[in-house]
């Protein structure tokens, strides 16, 4: 399909095209942006979704390093979270129960009986409005979505924005904002799965991962946090130095079994403010991505559920550990845990969150 060149300052560019159509005929728009000589990204209006991220290896060869569904049917089904902006509440709310003061709200739930990533029809399945943006040496796209009061059971009408910006040095910045007209909870993140060998290029078991956290949240069999923060010391969750993912997820530990044979846990990040959360690297290609965030937690998920039934854009099947998600966010079930950082948003306040992924090759 023909592309419209919307912004082209020097080596940076943004183009727009119709990517596909929803079952009801509404158009899904694709924006491609970044540096022609460096990292480029593709995002879709469906789910304000990161659909491709093309990064060079140490020899300058580019490859898409995020997993993505290959059809609209997949993007509305088993690939709905891949690369998507998830909300209104990322991660889990236990039993779909939300208490705000003296009022209890019943949220829509998945088959597990819990609310995951905003409910069965969360932000990942919505068409967002997008416009191209330019800021200094960055280009990208800003998406906007209105979520009415009662959406998936959540109180308050929320207006959410997510802005993707890329610079010539290979840093992808994702900034979130939200406002509400009544007290509610908001917790937004991006659900990209990374494979630095290339999308469909095998597993991430040979990747190295470092996470800047001395504690993590153990979970029950439904992946709901059990409660207090536990130290990572002496466990497979100790990633304060870079460790091979295979070494960690194949260890004998009850928390790995609870998550289906790998990580699906929140690390409680050290420090505060905008700081480094994690570093993921792939020695064979030399690709590395550094994750920085303002958020208190990092959900690390090693794609334990992939079973080969989903075929990605490469035409290859995604099997277990086909990608790893580094989801910057507040903690799961925070609305029901007064000891966790609050996710409450009131009228007149502004929800703000920023995450950056810095790509390099060595």
Image: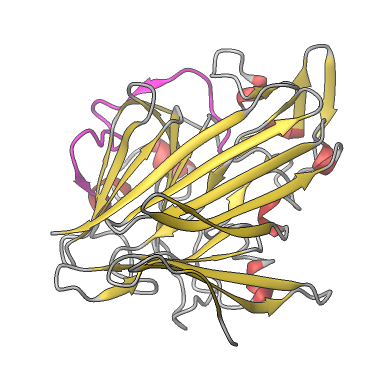
Where is residue 263? Give x, y as percent.
41, 45
Image label count: 0
Residue 104 colored magenta? no
Q: Which quarter shows the N terminus?
A: bottom right
Q: Is residue 257 left or right of residue 286?
A: right
Where is residue 265? Give x, y as percent.
45, 38
Say which of 337 and 198 sits in front.
Answer: 198
Q: Residue furthest bottom?
A: 1
The magenta segment is 222-245
Say which of 210 and 33 sits in front.
Answer: 33
Q: Which quarter shows the C terminus?
A: bottom left
Question: Can residue 182 be seen in this snapshot?
Answer: yes
| Colouring scheme, one of rainbow, by chain, secondary structure, one colour | secondary structure
Residue 225 colored magenta? yes
Q: Is residue 20 left or right of residue 220?
A: right
At 65% from the left and 38% from the top, the residue drawn is 89
Q: Is residue 308 above or below residue 99?
A: below
Among the 4 quarters of the image, the one containing residue 217? top left
At 44% from the left and 80% from the top, the residue drawn is 314
Where is residue 172? Give x, y as percent.
39, 53
Q: Is residue 299 above or below residue 62?
A: above
Q: Is residue 110 above or below residue 153?
A: below
Among the 4 quarters of the image, the one containing residue 161? top right
At 30% from the left and 40% from the top, the residue drawn is 278
Q: Residue furthest front?
A: 9
At 49% from the left and 78% from the top, the residue drawn is 313
Question: Can residue 303 be seen in this snapshot?
Answer: no
The secondary structure that most of the magenta stretch takes on is: loop
């Amino acid at each position: 399909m023909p592309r419209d060149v919307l912004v082209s300052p020097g080596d940076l560019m943004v183009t727009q095209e119709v990517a596909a159509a929803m079952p009801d005929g509404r158009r899904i728009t694709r924006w491609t942006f970044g540096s022609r000589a460096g990292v480029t990204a593709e995002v879709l209006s469906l789910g304000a979704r990161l659909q491709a991220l093309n990064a060079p290896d140490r020899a300058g060869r580019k490859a898409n390093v995020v997993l993505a569904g290959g059809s609209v049917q997949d993007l509305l089904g088993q690939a709905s979270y891949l690369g998507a902006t998830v909300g209104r509440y990322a991660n889990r709310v236990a039993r779909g129960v939300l208490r705000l003061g003296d009022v209890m709200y019943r949220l829509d739930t998945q088959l597990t009986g819990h609310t995951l990533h905003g409910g069965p029809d969360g932000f990942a399945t919505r068409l967002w409005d997008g416009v191209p943006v330019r800021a200094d040496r960055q280009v990208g796209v800003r998406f906007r979505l209105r979520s009415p009061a009662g959406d998936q059971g959540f109180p308050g009408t929320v207006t959410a924005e997510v802005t993707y910006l890329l610079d010539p040095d290979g840093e992808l910045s994702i900034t979130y904002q939200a406002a509400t007209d009544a007290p509610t909870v908001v917790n937004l993140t991006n659900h990209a799965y990374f494979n630095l060998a290339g999308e469909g290029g095998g597993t991430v078991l040979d990747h190295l991962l470092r996470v800047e956290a001395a504690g993590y949240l153990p979970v029950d069999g439904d992946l709901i946090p059990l409660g207090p923060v536990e130290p990572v010391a002496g466990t497979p969750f100790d990633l304060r130095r870079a460790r091979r993912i295979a070494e960690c997820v194949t260890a004998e530990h009850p928390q790995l079994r609870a998550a289906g044979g790998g990580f699906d846990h929140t690390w409680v990040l050290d420090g505060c403010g905008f700081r480094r959360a994690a570093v993921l690297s792939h020695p064979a290609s030399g690709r590395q991505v550094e994750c920085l965030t303002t958020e208190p937690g990092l959900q690390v998920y090693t794609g334990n559920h992939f079973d080969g039934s989903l075929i990605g854009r490469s035409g290859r099947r995604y099997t277990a550990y086909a990608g790893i998600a580094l989801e910057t966010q507040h903690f799961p079930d925070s609305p029901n845990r007064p000891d966790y950082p609050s996710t409450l948003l009131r009228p007149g306040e502004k929800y703000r969150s920023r995450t950056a992924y810095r790509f390099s090759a060595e």
